Amino acid sequence: MMFLPQLRGELHKLFARKRTYIGYVVFLVFEALLLTLWVQVGRDQFEALAKRNFVPVDLLSSSLTATYWIMGFSMFLLGSIYFALVAGDIVAKETEDGNMRMVLSRPVSRLRILVLKYCAVIIYTITFVIFVGVTGYSMAVFAMGSEGGLFIWNPDMQILAIYPDRDEAFWRLFLGACLMGVSMCVVSSLGFFFSCLKIKPAAASVMALSVFFIDFVLQNIPFLVNYKHVFITYRMGNWVYVLQEQIPWARITESYSILMGLNITLFTIGWMAFQSRDFKT
Amino acid sequence: MMLKVQNLTKKFAGKDALKGVSFEVKRGEIYGLLGHNGAGKSTTLGVILGMVAAGSGEVMIDGVSVQKDPRKALRKVGAIFESPAFYDYLSGWENLRVLVGLSGPFDARVAKEIVERVGLSDRIHSKVGAYSHGMRQRLALAQALLPEPEILLLDEPTDGLDPEGIKWFRDFVLGLREERGMTVLFNSHLLSEVEQMCDRVSIIRAGELVYEGAVNDLRDDRPGIRLTATPPEILAEVVGRFEAEVMPGGRWVFPEETRIAEVVTALVNAGAEVSEVTPVRRSLEDVYLEYSSQSQP
């Protein structure tokens, strides 16, 4: 019964901090920069490319296609940094600052404290991804108009799809953004896990990013191409399959089950570590 | 019994931090835990609050075991730490809402009353980052008193406060005991505070309780004599004959019926050269230092 007011308190703590908004501000600037570059430099080149490949120009040069590129390019690399920073802070910073002793002196279990913090981080992650999608699309509409469908070309995942119908394209992209948000929760879970250990907040973020980028690099090594499926970042990239014309639900379900399992495992190990810790001055 | 601490042990990195600490605090009592920095006071408090896992032993708060059911046990506890850490970017009121919300529903009316009582009404909606140390301590007191604890655990709460702040804090805590029969465990190395506030006291040294009793009993009002005489062997032999008790600082405490003139005469007759005979009365501080110092008293 008390969970929701407590979660509201946890979210209040998270969103009342100015640095929580650094990521939002940077992404807004980055989106504006990408769109400006697109309109000033890229659009002509892409339209010429589209004509050569018999792709309708209005599909490639549309606000939805621009949104797809903005999210696809920026979120995975830039977004992961912010999620690792926020999640790495969420427990370790309070422990370092001494707030955790105040919290633990209340009649509340450590599990409840961690569940509240984890939920806050997950909400932050998903809403952040949706924020980037919505603001990216709004800016794109402002710069390019709302007309046009969606053109997807992703050689890594072997996807080529064309959606002339704007409504279908919009909902596909929206669903993709939601799944991308779920994918990015893995970075947050990594940050959260390290934050539960007896380390500094910055170290928790760096450790989470290290795991994420090492996985990403390994996944892209050519001689490991047959083992792509074992890498977290490959599974995280599976959101893009909802943009395939025939959605491979079995593959998506498998990947997201693995990611969910990983999130639960990271939370559980983090909780066990946190539970066994002594909190002193 | 409001608080019962039974045979606590704890090791940090293989070193004993607590070695069988036991004491009891009665309902409505103000109990002081005295000791040097690193003696084990904060560790004891950490175990009582469930923040530090004891190696063995148990803490009961009003009959509920902290080790077995920490949530239930801590419902009756309010705690204040030295240099309380709040969320600086939130206002005092928001801090109260967040922290108290972890215990149960936040009652704004009761919170307002407590805030008024601790004298923070004017600044409660300001960011805590702008608070002075004294204001933070008042806010800490407010959060500890919400919702309605029966025992307050105070970990060196007056450290860093100015004399006015210390007096206010002391009067406030004594007032709580007066009005609500509040039980208080007061953890400090400030003797004057313990002396003025506590009914009973324990002295902890290197993780062990070396004294427990009433504050008045701790004072040693027996007059002592500082005797300086050479050679020291004769001094030792003569005062030994009078069954004197040796105390630190060259002080001797003789049985009540002993006349000091007789002691001095005996020393002179034995061939000693007496250079100082000074009556000395021990302060509470002397007694505390004797108990808490590394050498045995």
Image (cartoon, rainbow, N blue to C red):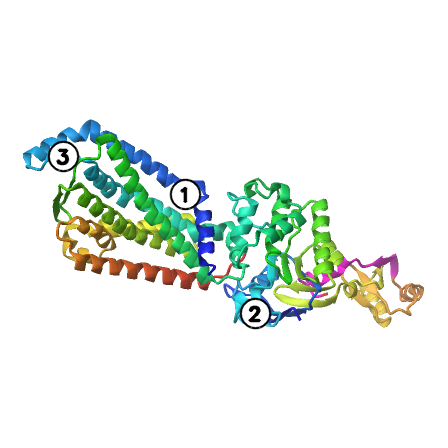
Q: Chain of mark 2?
A: B
Q: Which residue corresponds to mark 3?
A: A58
Which residue was labeled with disc 1?
Answer: A20
Identify the subunit bearing mark 1: A
| Residues marked 3 and 2, same chain | no
- Percent from the top left, x then y, of residue A211? 30, 52
| Three-letter amino acid code at the position of disc 2 | Thr
**Which structural element holds mark 3?**
helix
Q: Residues within 10 Å of mark 1 (few under 14, many from 20)?
A: some
Q: Is label 2 on the same chain as label 1?
A: no
Q: Quadrant of the C terminus of chain B?
A: bottom right
Q: Which amino acid type is marked by label 1? A: Thr
Image check: B232 left or right of A202?
right
Determine the CA span between mark 3 and mark 2.
75 Å
Q: Chain of mark 3?
A: A
Instruction: Read off the magenta span.
Output: B273-296
In front of the other: B276 or A108 = A108
Question: In percent of the image, x 30 and y 45: which residue is there?
Answer: A130
Q: Position of residue B13 (x, y in %)?
A: 50, 63
- Name the amino acid, label 3: Asp
> Alpha-carbon neighbours of circle 3 within 10 Å: few (<14), some, or many (≥20)?
some
Disc 3 and disc 1: Cα gap in Å? 37 Å
Q: Which residue is mark 2?
A: B9
- Per the image, label 1 sits on a secondary structure element best described as helix
> Which residue is nearer to you in this view: B243 or A277?
A277
| Number of marks drawn | 3
- In depth, the one of A209 and B218 nearer the eye is A209
- In which quadrant is the N terminus of chain B drawn? bottom right
